[in-house]
Every structure is written in C-alpha cells, then in structure tokens.
Image (spheres, coloured by chain):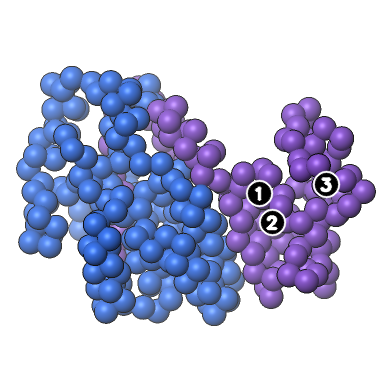
Chain colours: A purple, B blue
Amino acid sequence: MTAGTLTILDDGRPVDVAASPAAGRIRLDADALAALGWELTEDGLCREGLCVPTPATWSAADAVGLAELASVLGRSLAVDADERVAWLGAGADERARALRSLTAPDFALADLDGRVHRLSDHRGRKVLLVVWASW
Amino acid sequence: MAVDRGADDARPWIDAARPTHPSLIDPWHVVADLYNVVNVPTDVWIDERGRIVRPNDVGFGTDTFRALTGLDSAKHVAAIRAWVTGGLAPMPDERVRALQTLPTPEAQEARAEFALGRWLWERGRAGAAARHFDRASALAPHDFAIRRGTMPLRSIDPMGPEFRRMFAEWNAAGQPYYRPLPE
C-alpha cells in the first residue's frame, strides 16, 4: 500500500482508497465513496437508484468520516490506522432481518481437499448444520 | 463445519471420523457471522426448502463432555433422527423465531474486529492481529468462537488458564447465549 491510501475490506473485498487519518478520523472523499459503490447526493447516500438518508449536517462538498459512513449504512467497522486497513462488515440489523426471515443464509466453504460446497447445493434435502471446532 | 484456525487444525478429527457428509472448514467465521453462532457444538436444522426449522441449539453427538456440560447426547440425537425420518411435527415459524438469539451491535462489531485481525494475521502481522482479537474478545466476552477460537491465533492455549477464566466468567454471568433450547 502506498502512503496516503487505506485498504477498506468491504465484506472482505479489498477497496484501496485515498484517505488520511486526521485527528483520529478517516475521511473519505467522493472518489473513495465511489470506489465503495456510493454517491453522496441531495437524497442521501445512493447506489443503483436506492438512497440511504444521511444526517442534515452532511454536505456533498465535504469528505465523509468512515465511522459515520458505517453508522449510516448500519455496518460494523473495525479500523487499524497504523496498518492502514479497515474491515466493513455486516451490521446487527442486517443479520437479524435475514435470520428472522427463516431463509437459511447461503454460504460457500471448502472442505479439506479445497472443494467448495454451497448450502444451496443441498436444496431438496434436509441439512443438519453442525458447527464444531478442534479447540 | 469447523470454526478453526485452518484445515490442519481440523484435519485429524475429520480423518478419524471419515464422514460421508461434507465436512467444511470455516477459518473466517463465515457461518458464525451469518447464523450468530457463539460456541460449539451448535446445530441448526434446515429443511428441504432451505428454511430454518429449528434455530441454533447446543447439541452434543456424544457424551465425551457430559461431566463438564451436564448435557446428555441421547435426547439430542433421537430428536435429529426423528426429524430426518419425518417422525417429528414441524415447529411453527413463530416458535422458531421466538427461540432465536439475534446478534447485538456489539456482537457484529466483535466479528468485524475478528475479521480484520484474521486478515492481518494471514499477512504475518501477528502483533496487530492480536490487538483486534483482544478488542473482539472485549466486545463479545462470552463468544467462545471469537474469544476461545482466536486463542490458537494468539499463541494462547485454548484449554489453558485463559480459557478457564473465560469459562468462569461465562458461568458467573448465567451462561448467556449458549444453553440448549427449552424443548
């Protein structure tokens, strides 16, 4: 990573943006928001025609704080300013909504041989999901 | 799936069990994040349509840990058998929802801290990674998948004093989030 850039792992997808932590805040300009798939407009933060309302104090001319962005989007956030990397994960509301729907969230994971299995590959059969660990 | 540091940690158990079903490795806690899994073993029942018909439950397949947990495997295994063979009345959706434990904002912040730590750990940044595992553990002190599951990534014995401290704290707090369903 070059100086002045920050890697944001957006649900694990690395997005390199120009951002400098200043006074403990990481500020994102319009280009950084665009790299994350968002545009700040009069209607709020927008992506593909859908907009999330933003606080009245936000203006399209200003940079947006990463923490404020995560808060408005209802995302979880972990930051390491020294390592210049941040993780933008799923928020509690998003996860709770999905679980409440009772549709089992799909996922893909590899077995010991590296073969990837999807939960949805097993549609039509009952699935007993067992989470275990060696520890 | 094994919520483990990597395939090598899980391999001896999978090799010994020789399962005929898929046995997956989840080093990034993908399933723990999606399903709000905080400890092992955790079972979820999913029907033919891909619907959750019994939410996260604590269920042991054997009695290896019965002295420690006080939990018997026989009832649990019999219930699974009855479900698979169609001998069990389906649980109404509203009952399934009532028995679910949904993630808190702190739980999701902890998972973000875990994921960032994991990312750093994979890049050889063990010291930086440990900071985030510690933060994740502070945010979700009773989440065994995070606090105990990251001990091998922090060079801490997951059976040692640190684990016993966590176990004592969890007991003192009334064993939150990780008890068998009431039915």
Q: Which badge, 1 or 3, is on the more N-terminal residue?
A: 3
- Residue A110 vertical placement versus B50 (above, below): below
Q: Residue at x 46, y 62 (%)?
A: B139
Q: Residue at x 51, y 50 (%)?
A: B105
Q: Which badge, 3 or 2, is on the more N-terminal residue?
A: 3
Q: Is residue B154 at all visible to an observer of this figure?
A: yes
Q: Are marks 1 and 2 in contact (CB under 8 Å)?
A: yes
Q: Secondary structure at mark 1?
A: helix
Residue B119, percent across and down? 57, 64
Do pointers 1 and 2 mark residues of a single chain?
Answer: yes
Q: Toward which corner of the image does residue B21 lie, by quadrant?
A: top left
- Residue marked by disc 1: A71
- Residue marked by disc 2: A67
Residue A98, percent across and down? 48, 33
Q: Toward which corner of the image does residue B8 lie, by quadrant?
A: bottom left
- Residue A16 vertical placement versus B32 (above, below): below
Residue B74, percent across and down? 7, 43
- Residue B81 vertical placement versus B6 (above, below): above
Q: Residue at x 60, y 61 (%)?
A: A78
